[in-house]
Amino acid sequence: MKTRPSASGPPPSRRTCLRSGVAALAAAAVALGASACSSEANSVAAQAKAGDQKGFVSGDGTVETIAATERGEPVELEGDLLGGGRWASESARGQVVVLNVWGSWCAPCVAEAPHLQEVWAGLEKEGAPVLFMGIDFREDPARGLAFVTKMGVTYPSLSDESGTLILDLQGKAPTVPTTLVLDREGRIASRVNGPVDPTTLRGLVDDAVAE
C-alpha cells in the first residue's frame, strides 16, 4: 500500500524560499519608494514650487525664549535684497533684529504679513533700535517683490530662492513662517515657530531691547 503525501505537501526548496525572500524585499522597496515620494511631495520645497498654498502645514505658533547665558554664536547672514542691493546681519550689530522667514505661497505667511507690518510701523515711529528683515524662502524674487508691494510691507526682505540662507539660522527655522528675534549682539534671543501674534512679537522685541 502506497503512502499518500500529506495535504501540506513537501517542504519548500531552497530556491523557492530564496524567490519568496527576493519578492518580499522588492515589495518593501516599492513601499519605501512610494513613502519617500509622498514625503517629498509634502516637503516645504515642493510646496513652494507648487505655489498653490494647498495642504501646507506650518508651525503652531510655539514661542521659545533663550536666556542670555544660553544663547549661541551670532547669526551670520548675508544676501541679496528683493529689489536690489545686499544686506549683512553684521551691519545691524547694536540693534535688535527681527528675522521673518516667509513665502507668498504660504497661506499663514500671507495672513501674518499685516501683523508684522503693524509691529514694525509702530517701532519705527517710536525710533526704537530695531530692524526688521524678511527672508523670502524658495520663491522667484520678482514674485516676492510683487507680494510685499501689494501687501504694503515697508521693511526689506532678502531673497532666498535657492533655500540656502536659512541654513545660517542655526537650525531655528524648520518651518515657514518662522520669526526670530536677535539680541544686540546678533544672537537668537527668541523664536516663534509658525504664525506670529502681534502682541507676542512686540513683547519679545521689547524684552530684547530692554536687555
Image (tube, rainbow, N blue to C red):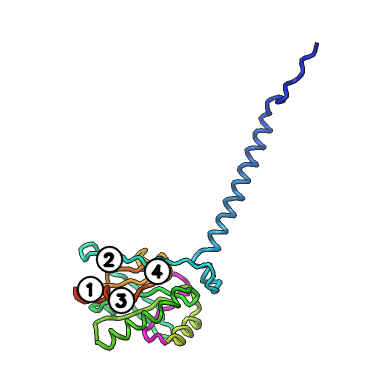
Query: Local crowd at mark 4 within 10 Å, few (<14), some, or many (≥20)?
Result: many
- Residue 115 position, x and y percent, is 37, 80
Q: Which residues are magenta?
A: 152-163
Counting residues from the start of the chain, the first of labels 3 and 1 encountered is 3
Q: Give the labeled residue for mark 4.
A: 194
Q: Which label sits in the foreground, 3 or 2?
A: 3
Q: Give the labeled residue for mark 3.
A: 199
Cβ atoms under marks 3 and 2 closer than 8 Å: no
The outermost residue toward the right is: 1
Q: Give the labeled residue for mark 1.
A: 207
Q: Give the labeled residue for mark 2.
A: 65
Counting residues from the start of the chain, the first of labels 2 and 4 encountered is 2
Residue drawn at x 52%, y 72% as measured from the top left: 53
115 within the magenta span: no
Whole-angstrom CA distance, mark 3 to mark 1, is 12 Å
160 within the magenta span: yes
Cβ atoms under marks 1 and 2 closer than 8 Å: yes
- At label 3, which amino acid type do we have? Thr
